[in-house]
Image (cartoon, rainbow, N blue to C red):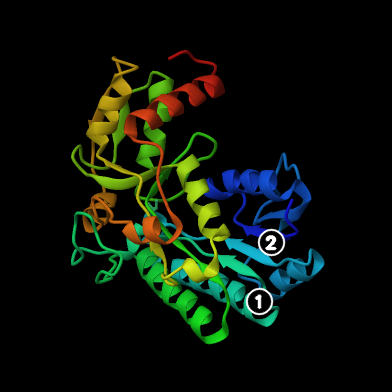
């Protein structure tokens, strides 16, 4: 077992919930300090109530647990951020600066900061969007991620802080729920399907977006963090891809197991956000630098999601 003391900020969130367990498996329960704004339940290891907007509180937690790695997962996502852009900007940037500064001041070993496909806008290539592409995001979330990527790169080059980052596509998992994103439908749809409820989708039938199943997302994150530093050529954030699909295609995939599943479409303001994002991503830099390789395609993910949710809801597929 490796001697690391890892702080996860946003451990109660969609990715944090699963990543906390995965890191505890790898480093030991007590080596991973799970933190969030609210008390975390059912923890196998230590946890803290922490508001990452409070730099002093963050420093106290870092000192208390002799933290040498931080995974900073807390952020306001794309759809929610549009309700109050200045608030979303403040949260996303202030919390990131607090993390980067503590990492610089206390010479932490590594920092993880997730970015997103939301860094791209309509000027970017829509298919197989390259790693180095024009970044003109149309949401405050996307703007904060472009700025964050550049600050991550700056802290690496100027201060030698080993910040690593992935541009996550929409992430789908059965263990936790997303909150306030444009890709949230791709999780919700499975919960409706397994309960034999029809689903009304807030994106149009043909809206293709890049997506990734949770086990692939967790493995990508850990593989990036474990890669040798000198292999990483990208210090802003790596493009990361798994699959691409539209709501119509998920519905078809679900119907292979649940033929009666019904979907209807009522696009709302999130359609414009989705339309500004790529349909597919070129992640060859990640494949080249640290051998990234996704495992799940749409049907493999659907089989596993429905199986896992059937257990959760005590239903049969
Ligand atoms: N899933 C995120 C969102 O929709 C994309 O990073 O905001």
The picture places residue 79, in percent across and down from the top left corner, at: 37, 55
Q: Which residue is found at the position 31% from the left and 48% from the top? A: 210
Q: Secondary structure at mark 2?
A: loop
Q: Residue furthest bottom?
A: 158
Q: Which residue is found at the position 49% from the left and 25% from the top? A: 309
Decide if residue 85 is in sight here: yes
In three-dimensional space, the C-alpha distance between marks 1 and 2, rounded to whole angstroms, equals 15 Å
Q: Secondary structure at mark 1?
A: helix
Report crowding for label 2: few under 14, some 14 to 19, many 20 or more residues within 10 A (C-alpha). many
Q: Which residue is found at the position 28% from the left and 28% from the top? A: 251
The picture places residue 222, in percent across and down from the top left corner, at: 55, 53
Residue at which label 1 appears: 102
Asked whether mark 2 lies closer than 8 Å to ligand 1, one says no
Q: Which residue is found at the position 36% from the left and 40% from the top? A: 185
**Which dot marks residue 50?**
2
**Which dot marks residue 66?**
none
1 over 227 or under it: above or below: above
């Amino acid at each position: 077992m490796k001697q690391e003391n890892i702080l996860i900020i946003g451990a109660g969130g969609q990715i944090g919930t699963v990543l906390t367990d995965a890191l505890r498996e790898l480093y030991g329960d007590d080596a991973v300090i799970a933190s969030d704004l609210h008390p975390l339940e059912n923890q196998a290891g230590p946890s803290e109530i922490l508001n990452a907007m409070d730099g002093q509180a963050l420093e106290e937690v870092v000192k208390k647990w002799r933290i040498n790695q931080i995974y900073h997962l807390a952020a306001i996502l794309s759809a929610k951020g549009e309700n109050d852009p200045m608030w979303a900007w403040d949260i996303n940037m202030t919390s990131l600066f607090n993390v980067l500064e503590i990492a610089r001041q206390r010479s932490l070993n590594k920092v993880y900061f997730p970015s997103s496909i939301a860094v791209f806008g309509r000027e970017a290539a829509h298919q197989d969007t390259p790693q180095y592409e024009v970044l003109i995001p149309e949401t405050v979330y996307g703007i904060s991620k472009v700025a964050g990527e550049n600050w991550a790169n700056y802290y690496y080059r100027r201060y030698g802080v080993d910040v690593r980052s992935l541009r996550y596509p929409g992430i789908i998992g059965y263990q936790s729920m997303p909150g306030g994103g444009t890709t949230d439908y791709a999780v919700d749809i499975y919960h409706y399907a397994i309960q034999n409820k029809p689903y009304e989708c807030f994106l149009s039938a043909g809206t293709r977006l890049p997506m990734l199943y949770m086990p692939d997302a967790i493995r990508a994150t850990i593989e990036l963090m474990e890669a040798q530093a000198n292999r990483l050529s990208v210090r802003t954030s790596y493009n990361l891809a798994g699959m691409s699909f539209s709501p119509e295609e998920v519905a078809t995939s679900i119907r292979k197991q649940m033929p009666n599943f019904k979907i209807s479409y009522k696009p709302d303001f999130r359609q414009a956000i989705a339309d500004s994002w790529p349909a597919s991503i070129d992640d060859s830099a990640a494949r080249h630098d640290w051998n990234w390789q996704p495992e799940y395609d749409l049907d493999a993910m659907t089989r596993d999601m429905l199986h896992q949710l059937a257990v959760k809801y005590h239903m049969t597929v």
